[in-house]
Image (tube, helix red, strand yellow):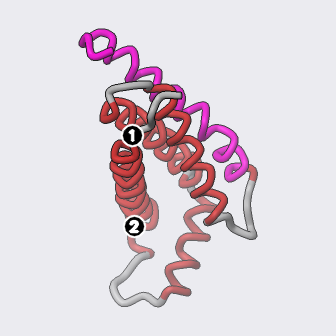
Amino acid sequence: MPRISLHALITAFSSEILVDLLVHHVVVAIFAGDLLVAGMSQDAIGEVLKTIAGTTPYLPVMFTCGSITTVAGAWLAARLAKRVPYYHGLAMGIIGVVFGLFFWSDQATWLDYFGLLTTIPLSLFGAHLARKRMLELGIL
């Protein structure tokens, strides 16, 4: 079995998580608008999040952004490893599923389940895109 690059996986997954956090903060700021003010308590911020999740297209936007970062993270892992891109994409998907289950909420919605089910296929798609590009560049 070919060796998986832990360096590529750690770098790609860390990058993916950082981009996810940045995107989350930007999207919340956009949808919350004037509802967010400096010095708010955690409970008040939680109420704002519930409000925007229930009244705006926040959840579909976040799901779409999360899907894009999942594809990009697997693509990055495969490109950094420069070998066996599908194994690296699968590894990124498995890491994503484990990470998602570790932070699973008691109030999971259909979107949470759908996200969990699509993580590995999206990761494999990112690896496919990386493989295609690496073949074009003569890396594989």
Along the horizontal axis of the image, is 43 left or right of 115? left
| Total marks in image | 2
Spatial CA distance of label 2 from label 1 is 42 Å
Residue 40 point in image, percent of width and height: 42, 88
The disc label shown at residue 5, or none: 1
Q: Give the x, y percent position of residue 93.
A: 56, 41
Mark 2 vs 1, N-terminal side: 1
Question: Magenta residues: mostly which secondary structure?
Answer: helix
Q: Residue at x 74, y 67 (%)?
A: 107
- Identify the residue shown where x is 68% and y is 49%: 111
Q: Give the residue pinned by disc 2.
A: 33
In the figure, is residue 31 to the left or right of 26? right
Query: Which of these two is toward me, 65 or 59?
Result: 65
Q: Which residues are magenta?
A: 111-140
In the image, what residue type sits under mark 1?
Ser
Q: Quadrant of residue 124?
A: top right
Instruction: Residue 99 in the image: state x and y as whole percent.
Output: 57, 57
Q: Is residue 116 magenta?
A: yes
Residue at disc 2, secondary structure:
helix
Under tag 1, what secondary structure? loop
